[in-house]
Image (spheres, rainbow, N blue to C red):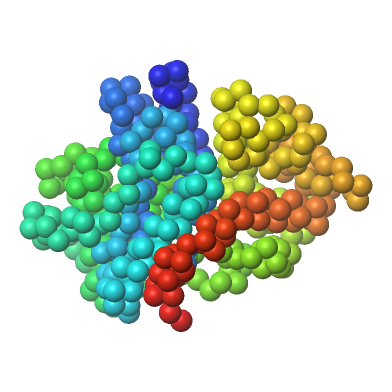
Amino acid sequence: MSATLSLEERLNLVTRGQKLVNPGDIDSLESLLATTKRPKIAWETTPTGKPHVGYFVPLAKLADFVKADLEVTLFYLDVYGFLVNYIYPMEVVENRRKYYHHLMTAVLRSLGVDLSKIRFVAESSFAYRKEYFVDVLRTCALMTQQDAKDTCEETAETKMLSPLLCCVYQSLSEQYLDIDIQFGGEDQRGLFIHSIKYLPLLGYRKREHLMNAMVTGLQGGKMSSSHAAETKIEFLDDPETVQKKINRMPCEPGDVQSTVVLLLRDVLLPISQQRVESLQDSGTSWELDGNNKPRPFITEDAPQGTIFSIPAGSWGDSRHYTSFADIQNGFGEGEISPAALKLAVTNAFNNLLGKIRAIYSESKEWQLVDKLAYPD
């Protein structure tokens, strides 16, 4: 794909919707894309609680990286998962890694991502090697306890030792995966800063880092896999549950900072935009689902350039929008009602989740792993 893309186009694909740890890093990132044939990037995820729809944000972003011709790795931090979630035995963490793999591949399939373009790696595949453990010790010898506590919320107040080691393991993963870029949520900033500081002290090169926005939970704060089910929309929630959760969300007329608006901005619109681009790239008819490509969240009568359609009135009509700014203005000015917005968001999420639920219902292996990973 990148053979037809300019450097500027590739850089835009890689960075859209992302933040950098330091704004000046854009120059080194551009240089990397210009001088490296296929830069290697990894998204790292820790198998803890059941994931939620906020994971659509990084998983959909992987499609941009593939399109920009990056070599993409999805990395399961299973050792990290045991260290930070120490109340569970290793066997449960291993089953959670398997659950995450079933889920992540199902989500990627639902997004139309070619799984052959993604490398899947478990941290435990190299974390017990002698040379790796020596590097763990070398890193620990350079750090204070406060250095570890400063990396993220999970370690700031802990009284246990094991969570303090997590930053060491995540930083070293960059070297042992041999990647050029690590990608994660804005909550990973402290961990990325740790890597930037300590890898060069070990004699290893500094990597680039990209951060996506964190999705707001249904009751405020960030949506987290470690939080209760009522605070998030889970991937296997049935249509009625999704509808109830969204209908319960506060959404006052004109409040453009309501969680419903933010879910639309951060989760749904980037996916719909990708689907529009995919149809355009393939020359597929706007009205048809040619080549089994997932449809954008638009109605059949949507004009070219539309990325999201929202019901208007009770006659089956819709309003069509070409950007988030248009939707934001429409909602802020009262053109879009809270009920119409919630209906559109509910329909879009159930459209996304339907294929994932179908894959789960057909996989006895995934269902068994589910019971072993989350026995409560």
Q: Nearer the viewer, residue 78 or 119?
A: 119
Q: Nearer the viewer, residue 133 or 94?
A: 94
Against 89, residue 317 (above or below) is: above
Residue at position x 26%, y 40% from top? 179
Residue 45 visible in this rendered orientation of the protein = yes
- Specify whether 31 is left or right of 374: left
> Could you tell me residue 317's position as x and y percent?
87, 42
Residue at position x 57%, y 60% from top? 357
- Specify whether 79 is left or right of 106: left
> Could you tell me residue 38's position as x and y percent?
31, 29
- Specify whether 60 is left or right of 299: left
Residue at position x 72%, y 40% from top? 298
Q: Which quadrant is the N terminus positioned in?
A: top left
> Could you tell me residue 25's position as x and y percent?
35, 34
Q: Residue furthest right?
A: 315
> Could you tell me residue 358's position as x and y percent?
57, 58
Give the image quarter of residue 102: bottom left
Q: Nearer the viewer, residue 90 or 7?
A: 90
Q: Nearer the viewer, residue 233 or 150?
A: 233
- Total numbered labels placed on residues in the image: 0
Residue 49 visible in this rendered orientation of the protein = no
Residue at position x 11%, y 57% from top? 129
Give the image quarter of residue 304: top right
Against 225, residue 211 (above or below) is: above
